[in-house]
Image (cartoon, rainbow, N blue to C red):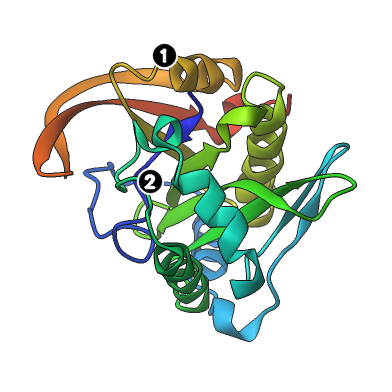
């Protein structure tokens, strides 16, 4: 299962993480990174990315049916904070929330398309933690595309963007304890477990224990 659902209940999530502040000795470097994090995304174009096998781009309302196809699969939503979709309007809402998150500078979410098709098969992205100069990553992928290296390739590309373009100090991810596939994916990318937090998440009417993973900028190596 390649799904981490922490960014879709509201525009890029309303849950604030208790992430420690990062203190950087070089004040000029710190200020530069802060300025990048605070940049008003509504004044810049969406940063489309390309890898060997994938296009990573902003979703539009024309992608609503593709997004519905992903989230109408209970295998995908098993470890996600969203219920399994039953109406196309729910996918329309996802597109709107993600666009709003980018426009306000709160986060960014790339739709994933496998070349040569432009059809979306999932997404990945960040919620920015500007105070800590960090980000939280979230992702999901259509079940028919699991175990093909797609999400590993996509996350490697956006992590490179986060560290090298945005200059974040570290990236975190939180997964449900039974999400074995996501744990393996994160470890493959160099994330290290920070421990289990009891009842840290709350969605679908109940609390969930979550395991937090973290990847420091200095430890990142593109897969």
Give the image location of residue 185, x and y in percent: 55, 20
Q: Is residue 88 above or below residue 80?
A: below
Q: Nearer the viewer, residue 153 or 111?
A: 111
Q: Which residue is mark 2?
A: 23
Q: Quadrant of residue 131?
A: bottom left
Label located before the other in sequence (1 or 2): 2
Q: Of 69 and 22, which appears nearest the observer?
A: 69
Q: Is residue 35 visible?
A: yes
Q: Pointer 2: residues within 10 angstroms few (<14), some, or many (20+)? A: few
Q: Residue at x 45, y 70 (%)?
A: 101
Residue at horizontal 49%, vertical 51%?
126
Q: Position of residue 176 (x, y in %)?
A: 29, 25
Q: Is residue 189 above or below residue 107?
A: above
Q: Quadrant of residue 199?
A: top left
Visible residue check, residue 169? no
Q: Which residue is mark 1?
A: 180
Quarter of the C terminus within the rendering: top right
Q: Position of residue 128 (x, y in %)?
A: 43, 57
Q: How many marks?
A: 2
């Amino acid at each position: 299962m390649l799904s981490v659902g922490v960014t879709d209940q509201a525009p890029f999530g309303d849950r604030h993480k208790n992430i420690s502040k990062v203190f950087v000795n070089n004040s000029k470097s710190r200020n530069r990174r802060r300025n990048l994090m605070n940049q008003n995304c509504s004044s810049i174009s969406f940063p489309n990315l390309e890898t060997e096998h994938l296009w990573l781009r902003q979703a539009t309302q024309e992608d609503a049916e593709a997004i519905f196809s992903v989230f109408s699969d209970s295998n995908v939503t098993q470890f996600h904070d969203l219920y399994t979709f039953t109406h196309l309007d729910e996918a329309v809402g996802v597109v709107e929330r993600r666009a709003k998150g980018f426009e306000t500078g709160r986060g960014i979410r790339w739709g994933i398309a496998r070349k040569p098709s432009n059809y979306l098969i999932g997404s990945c992205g960040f919620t920015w933690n500007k105070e800590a100069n960090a980000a939280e990553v979230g992702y999901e992928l259509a079940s028919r595309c699991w175990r093909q290296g797609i999400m590993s390739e996509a996350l490697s590309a956006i992590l490179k963007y986060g560290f090298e373009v945005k200059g974040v100090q570290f990236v975190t991810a939180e997964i449900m304890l039974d999400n074995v596939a996501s744990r393996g994916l994160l470890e493959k990318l160099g994330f290290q477990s920070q421990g289990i937090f009891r009842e840290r998440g709350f969605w679908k009417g109940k609390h969930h224990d979550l395991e937090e993973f973290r990847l420091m900028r200095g430890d990142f190596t593109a897969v």
